[in-house]
Image: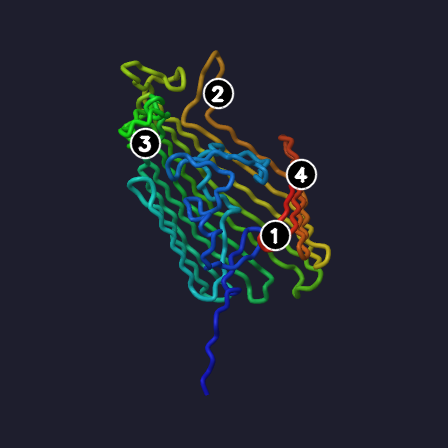
């Protein structure tokens, strides 16, 4: 008698978000996949790209942007490709999974995103991925070089009382920064000689920016009741440590246009050798208690502690005033969150309020109704 071998079905290849929404790995080739075949690996609707891969984007619609009330690093124009904690995906797969993305970019360069995931047991998953880009660009001083490394692991106990998601990321983004074309009339003239864009003179021929960051993140919970039922009680904890570094380097401050010396962005404190460095690190801990009812939804009550340190490598003295080199903040808060998901309705309501010296309150509500598999109505 021939023994039938087990077959891995598509629902055994799962992708899990930080909010524990689960989808399946989709290997089909559809028009939606074409929309996401780009540097950011997502649909770019509402974003207007700059001339080179790996540069920033102009945001054309802000309708569903997320907002954090806690102090952040800034330099948001450099963060489009910087993976935040809530953008990391965790997995559970029946067999090892590999995904490769490759694309040629502007002039000399390539973009590669490689992903590998494996379950060593049904309860333990590891994944490792790296996305790299090097694109020369069509204009002078426009090179982009980036790297995004991420490692994740997911674990749950045999009785499914304890679940944990962990990840580590190391990311760096380098952009050469020109200040735009010096002679716009050459660009608009229609002269075939200037179709080779590197023949157009630009401001700032040696400036560059560099963003680097590392993060260690852990999110886990434990179910107090031994058997899962209609009513469940969980203890939750989330830890996030992150450091970031940004540098803007411009050896030559002035630009020359037709023999004339020009300060592209007005007067500067320094006549040469600009090298501004900004450092930031944060530690975030959140402890909560969650009550889950299969009919009513989830009720989570929590306290969190946020500490950040924002600092430079210099101080500024101007008009008898001194701007210090660092700014440290500690914000402790309490709050509650309600999550509801039933049939086609999904809702989330969040309230937080600080009880430290810095007053901070936040109220967030999101509701979504699924019309069909391809269309949803959302409000927030």
Position in image of residue 17 (x %, y %) = 54, 52
**Residue in view at x 39 percent, y 39 percent:** 54
How busy is the neighbourhood of tag 3: few (under 14 within 10 Å), some, or many (20 plus)?
many
Seen from the viewer's position, the closer of residues 202 and 255 is 202
> Residue at 33% of width from left, 36% of height from top?
137
Sequence-first tag of 1 and 4: 1
Q: Nearer the viewer, mark 1 or mark 4?
A: 4
Q: Secondary structure at mark 1?
A: strand
Drawn side of residue 70 relative to residue 338, left or right: left
- CB under 8 Å between discs 2 and 1: no
For mark 1, does the 10 Å Cα neighbourhood hold few (<14), some (14 to 19), or many (20 or more) residues?
many
Mark found first going from the N terminus, 3 or 1: 3
Depth check, mark 4 against mark 2: the one in front is 4
Percent x, y for residue 77?
Answer: 46, 33
Labels 1 and 4 touching (C-beta < 8 A): no
Q: Which residue does the numbered mark 4 point to in the structure image?
A: 363
Q: Secondary structure at mark 2?
A: strand
Q: Vertically, is 191 above or below 13?
A: above
Task: Say which label, 2 or 1, has the lower sequence index.
Answer: 1
The answer to whether residue 378 is left or right of residue 122 is right
Image position of 60 with respect to 83: above or below = above
Q: Are marks 3 and 2 in contact (CB under 8 Å)?
A: no
Mark 3 vs mark 1, foreground winner is 3
Residue 335's place in the image compared with 159, above or below, is: above
Q: Which mark is residue 323?
A: 2
Rendering quarter of residue 51:
top left
Left or right, 337 with reference to 10: right
Q: Which residue is mark 3?
A: 139
Mark 3 → mark 1, Cα distance in angstroms:
51 Å
Task: Spot the residue most to the top.
Answer: 319
Q: Name the residue that disc number 1 marks.
A: 236
């Amino acid at each position: 008698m021939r023994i039938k071998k087990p077959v891995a079905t598509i629902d055994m290849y799962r992708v899990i978000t930080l909010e524990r929404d689960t989808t399946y790995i989709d290997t089909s080739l559809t028009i939606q996949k074409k929309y996401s075949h780009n540097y950011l690996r997502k649909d770019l609707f509402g974003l207007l790209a700059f001339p080179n891969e790996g540069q920033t984007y102009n945001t054309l619609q802000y309708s569903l942007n997320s907002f954090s009330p806690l102090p952040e690093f800034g330099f948001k124009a450099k963060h489009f490709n910087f993976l935040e904690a809530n953008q990391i995906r965790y997995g559970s797969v029946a067999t090892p999974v590999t995904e490769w993305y490759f694309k040629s970019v502007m002039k000399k360069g390539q973009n590669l995103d490689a992903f590998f995931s494996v379950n060593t047991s049904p309860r333990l998953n590891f994944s490792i991925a790296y996305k790299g880009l090097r694109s020369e660009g069509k204009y002078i001083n426009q090179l982009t070089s980036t790297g995004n490394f991420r490692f994740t692991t997911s674990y749950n106990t045999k009785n499914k009382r304890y679940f944990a998601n962990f990840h580590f990321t190391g990311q760096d983004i380098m952009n050469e920064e020109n200040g735009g074309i010096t002679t716009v009339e050459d660009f608009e003239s229609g002269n075939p000689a200037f179709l080779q864009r590197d023949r157009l003179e630009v401001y700032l021929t040696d400036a560059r920016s560099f963003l680097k960051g590392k993060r260690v993140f852990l999110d886990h919970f434990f179910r107090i009741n031994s058997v899962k039922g209609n009513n469940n009680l969980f203890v939750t904890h989330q830890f996030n440590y992150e450091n970031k570094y940004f540098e803007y380097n411009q050896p030559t401050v002035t630009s020359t246009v037709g023999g004339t010396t020009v300060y592209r962005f007005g007067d500067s404190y320094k006549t040469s050798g600009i090298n501004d460095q900004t450092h930031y690190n944060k530690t975030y801990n959140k402890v909560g208690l969650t009550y889950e009812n299969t009919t009513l939804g989830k009720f989570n009550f929590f306290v969190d502690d946020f500490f950040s340190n924002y600092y430079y490598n210099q101080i500024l003295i101007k008009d008898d005033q001194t701007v210090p080199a660092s700014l440290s903040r500690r914000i402790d808060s309490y709050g509650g969150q309600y999550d509801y998901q039933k049939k086609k309705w999904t809702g989330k309501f969040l309230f937080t309020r600080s009880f430290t010296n810095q007053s901070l309150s936040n109220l967030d509500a999101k509701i979504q109704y699924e019309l069909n598999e391809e269309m949803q109505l959302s409000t927030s």
